[in-house]
Image: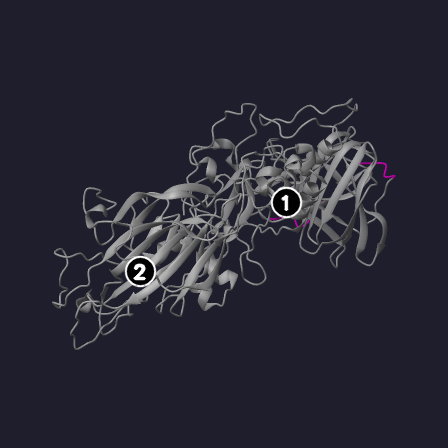
Amino acid sequence: MKLRRTIFGAVAGAALLALAMTQGAVAQISDEYTISIGSKIYQPQTNQGTTITRDMFRDLFAPTVVDPDNGVAGPFPLGFAFEFNNQIYTQIYVCVNGWISFQNPGGYITDDPYSLFNGARPNLTIAPFFGDHYLRTPINDDLDPQFRQYTPSTIRIVRKTGTIQPRRDTTVVEWEDLNINYRFDPTRPNDPFAPVANVKPQASSVGSFQAWLIQAQPGNPSQQGRIEFHYGPIGPRVPFPDSVGVIVKVSSASVGIEDEPAVPGGQTSFLNAVAYRESNGRFDSTTQSRRLTRVWPPTGFPARIFIFEGNGVRRIQTWGDGDADLTQLNLTVPQYIREDQRRFVTFLDVIRILRHQATRTDIIPGIIDTNGVDSSHLRFDYTFGRHGFHGDVNHDGRFYFSTRNYNNTADSLGFNNRLVTYEVKFPIKSDNYQTPFPADNSFNGFLYDADEFDASLIMLYLSAKLPVLPWLPDTLPSFTGKMVAGTTANDVQLARGGSVIGNRVEIPITFNGYLHGALGVGMDAANGTRIVEVRTMPKTDNAWVEAVASQSHLALAAAGNFNPNDVVATLVVEANNQGEVSFGTVKVGSDVKSARKFNIFSPVTGDASTLGLTSNMPNPFAPNTTTSFGYTVPTDGPVTIRVYDVLGHEVATVVNSTLMTGSYLGTWNGIDSFGKPVTSGVYYCRIESNGQSRTISMQVSK
């Protein structure tokens, strides 16, 4: 799984967000279809529909060559529109090896059932019985190597009109009397390590099965229909005298449906019907297991079918219209409401965005959780046309996933050499709405996200301070009203406030400047820090703050007019046993700020007369580890802390913010401004504020 980026260049490091994803974490098919087992008698389609003749199956590597072993035929019209993996299709391709696809598979091997479970083509696959099969036809294939007569095979497409109630059309693909899993040792049919000399085509291994594609119900806002897998008789129909007996190999086929990678070279997601049945419907097994068939029928009993029912997900192409809870897609809401943006964009959209941001789970690249399992990054349904697509009102949420490391030289390997995937943002917001997408992605490959900043912009719209959503091109409009003179807020300030009871303390949150408009804040508590509660300032005609918090995440949105000394919210947190409160990630607007850390038991002196900077601990320290230092700010105002090398070149900016009087704890991880570890040597840390400065030396040792 290698995605070679052809964009970003020098800004690649800044564009990457270190939010690791395990392969396959971008699940789509599992969101769109629900699997079940139903009852239905097998209905042979003999002498019906259109037969796909032997000469129509072609070798994908040599399209002029007829291939009854691994050939693919098509495209064939479905007769109706069918939604699959976020796209609408009207035609299919059919393979001898027991699967169909909505796209031309291209030059790929088609007989490997494990390809259903990875990014290798065929993708967009409907697989009732995906194995290594053969289409046997008279004259061409009469006898096997043991001079036993083959049962002739037929692959056909049958279109039925209005046979499913309420009146729906159906397309059936039937593999009748197919020579299934045809090469094996008859004394060891299920042994993949049987002697090669004994592995031969076997005329007795014959089976019939079908894939049914059923049109969505009339009037359904979604065109997701139903997919069914039906299983008929096995065994030859011709006279078959043999001392060994009739042997049908029913093992080693995959059964299920699969989407396509979100980006070229990426992983696919799938629903494994065999794993669903054998695990009694466990979701994790259905979406992760690579189990193959072991019995016939794969459903476990005759007259049973696998059903993949579309969840009726509707999508519309109105990016960033603010409707994050998809009110306008709810047909129970009157049409006159759904047509009016002022009515379908509501406070519920704000809460939905904040709730998702506060309850997500993140993971540092390559780190495995305490159960030994890679965690997921949970957010909105961020596929095209869904919640994140509509909620991303400032149009900065486009991203995709890449396994490439920061300098784009190789795949990223994490804990135990496990491949991790990074979230990669679309390069920049552009003043030109015609800015092309990256060369290695398609429009459909992009994912979309709504965050705290989007929630705050929706709040500004709801409070009648913005005229309309969304805005095109990708630029924010000028906010209405008179701008407040002074420093514009671009960060938050945290301080110890109230009394400390045990390890619990109140933390007032203020902006570092004046705000006239909208701003979102996201904060992730580091290990050992637990968020207990968040309280927002009272809503007024000119200021509105909403916040949602979990134990590890805060999501806050502010809209209106705010001064630097306004406490927009108060966090109640529990520190670790040493009294340390840490926030590993602080995101303000669209910018990721530095981590925050302080000790609730350290004295905070509001009347300190001089600027202070203490020696760092540990010292020396290694890159990619953390060294800490204390500093005291004597008066409210701008504070910068920068690191320089021995030649006076700036290496990194640790703090660049407006702070209130008090004592703080700063950290540096030995990483320069370009995201690279610094070399061993002496570095100088310098604090500047209100005309004063202090400097300490630091020793980096690898």
Near-viewer residue (648 or 147): 147
Between residue 228 and residue 372, name the one nearer to us. Answer: 228
Of the residues shown, which amino acid type is indicated by label 1?
Thr
Q: Quadrant of residue 530?
A: bottom right
> In the image, residue 14 lies at what x, y percent?
55, 36
State yes or no: residue 615 in magenta: yes
- The Cα atoms of the two marked residues, 2 and 1, are separated by 41 Å
Q: Amino acid at mark 2?
A: Pro
> What crowding class fits label 2: few (fewer than 14 Cα within 10 Å), some (14-19), or many (20 or more)?
some
Does label 2 or label 1 sit earlier along the sequence? 2
Magenta stretch, overall SS: loop
Quarter of the image holding residue 65?
A: top left
Q: Residue at x 74, y 44 (%)?
A: 547
According to the picture, the residue beneath numbered tag 1 turns out to be 332
Residue 588 versus residue 297 in the image, above or below: above
Q: Is the residue marked by circle 1 packed among few (<14), some (14-19), or many (20+) residues within 10 Å? A: few
Q: Who's the residue at 17% across and 67% down the image?
A: 197
Magenta residues (range): 607-621
Q: Is residue 415 above or below residue 386?
A: below
Relative to 42, 216 lies left or right: right
Residue 420 within the segment the image draws in magenta: no
Task: From the viewer's side, name the closer residue of 84 and 633.
Answer: 84
Q: Which residue lies under the disc numbered 2?
A: 44
Dividing the picture into quadrants, the one containing residue 292 is bottom left
Regarding mark 1 in the picture, which secondary structure is present there? loop
